[in-house]
Amino acid sequence: MKLKLTLFLISLSLIAFAQKSHIEGTIDGIDNATIHILALPLKEGAKPIFDTTSCTDGKFNYTLNYGVNMWHLVIISSDSFNAFFGSEKSSKQELQNRDIRFFIKPVEDIVVSASFADYGIKCSITGNDIGRQMNQVKEAKFPYSERFNQLTIQKEKEPEGSNKIAELDKELQSVNDQLDSIDLQIIAKHSDWEYSADLLAKFPNDTIEKYYNRFTPTVKNSIFGAHVSNALTASKKDLPAPSFSLPDTTGKIHSLSDYKGKYVVLDFWGTWCGSCVGGFPKLKEYYSKYKDRVEFIGIDCQDHEELWKNAVVKYELNWTNLFAANKVITENYGITNYPTKFIIDREGNIVLKSSGEDQEFYDMLDELFN
C-alpha cells in the first residue's frame, strides 16, 4: 500500500511538471525573424523561462513547458520589432507597446494576433478571460500610447537646452494623466476583473485603498488581488522596512541592518525590464548628486545571475548591487511592478514607496537632501 501511494504521488508530481501551454501567433509586417520568449512566474522564487522560436511568414508556434504550476507573464520581443520602427526609438525612455505581453497559466492555449502601427504594436489575445480584459484596456489606451511614444521620441531628438522640451514635457504629462484616468475608469467599472487588480498595483497607496475594497472576493483571492494586498501592507509609510540578507556581485552578503543610521534607497529591478533600464540615466544622476548622504542599493529580481552581473557592468551601475535568488524579499516588500523604489530613513522606516519611473521618488530625494 505504501509503495502504491508513493508511486501515485510521483505520478502526480510528473503530471504537474509536464503541464504546458501552446502559443500560436500571427504578426503582420514581419516575415522571418527570431522571436524571444520570456515567461516570468507571478510568484517569486520560481525561475523565469528564457527561450527563442522562429517566426516564418509572419507566423510562429511555441510550446511553453512549465517548471511550476502557476500564472506567468509572457513577454514576446524581437530585434525585428525594433528594426521595423527604424529611427523611431528612444535610448532613454521605455516606449509603450514595443513588445507583446499577456498572462497565461498551465494548460491554456493562447492565440496572438499583432500588427504594427506608427509607433507601437497593436495586439489581441484570445484564450483566457484576462486576455480579453487586457484587449479592452489596450484598445482604449492605444491612441494615447501612440501619442506618448511620438512625443517621447520627438523630445529626445530636441537639442539640449531647446525651449521645445518644456512644452513636450507638459504634453507628455497630460498624456500620462489620460492613460492613468483610463486605468482608473476600468478599475472602477470592472471590480470583477482580475486585470483590474493588476492595473491598480502601480498606483499610490491612497488610490489602492480607495479601490481595493470594491473588488469582488474572487478578485481579492486571485494572485493579482493578493499582490495588491501584499503591496499595500508592505509599503505603509513609517513602518519598519523588512530585513534582508543578499549577495553582491562578489558573493559578499549585505543586510539592511548594515546601513542603520543612513538613509537608504532600494531599487528593485530586472535585466528584462525596459522601464528599469530606461530609468538608469536619471537614477545615476541622483546617485551622483546624493551618494554622500544616501546609500543606493539595486536589487535584481526574477533573473539569471549571469545576466544580472553582465548588466551591472554594461550599464555602469556603481552603487551596491544585490541579487534576489528567491521570493522572500519581494514578497516582504510587496513588489508587484518593476521598477519599484523605496526610500528608508536612518531608523530603518519606510519613507516612500514608488512604482515605475515616478517623479515623486526624485522629488522626495530633493526634498530630503537639498
Image (cartoon, rainbow, N blue to C red):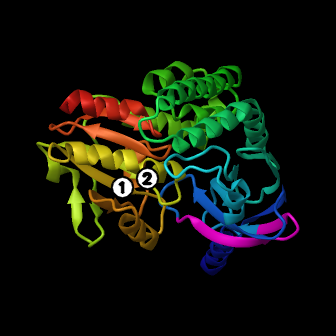
Q: Residues within 10 Å of mark 2 (few under 14, many from 20)?
A: many
Amino acid identity at mark 1? Ile
Quadrant of the rendering where the N terminus is positioned: bottom right
- Measured as percent of width and height from the top left, residue 300 is found at 40, 58
Instruction: Name which quarter of the figure residue 137 lies in.
Output: top right
Q: Is residue 162 left or right of residue 135?
A: left
- Measured as percent of width and height from the top left, residue 84 is found at 73, 57
Is 55 covered by the magenta stretch? Answer: yes
Quadrant of the rendering where the C terminus is positioned: top left
Is 208 covered by the magenta stretch? Answer: no
- Which residue in the protein does label 1 denote? 299
The residue sitting at 47% across, 29% down in the picture is 163
Q: Is residue 81 left or right of residue 68?
A: right
In this view, which residue lies farthest toward the right?
57
Quick one: label 1 or label 2, which is nearer the N terminus?
Answer: 2
The residue sitting at 23% across, 43% down in the picture is 289
Which residue range is magenta in the image?
47-62
Q: CA distance from mark 1 to mark 2?
A: 6 Å
Q: Is residue 350 left or right of residue 148?
A: left
Picture disc at residue 252 = none
The residue sitting at 77% across, 34% down in the picture is 139
Instruction: Please say whether residue 90 is visible from this viewpoint.
Output: yes
- Measured as percent of width and height from the top left, residue 24 is found at 83, 61
- Which residue in the protein does label 2 denote? 269
Q: Is residue 21 left or right of residue 298?
A: right
Residue 49's place in the image compared with 99, above or below, is below
Residue 123's place in the image compared with 7, above or below, is above
Q: Main secondary structure of the magenta part?
A: strand
In this view, which residue lies farthest toward the left?
261
364 or 299: which is nearer to us? Answer: 364
Residue 135's place in the image compared with 207, above or below, is below
Disc 1 vs disc 2: Cβ atoms closer than 8 Å?
yes
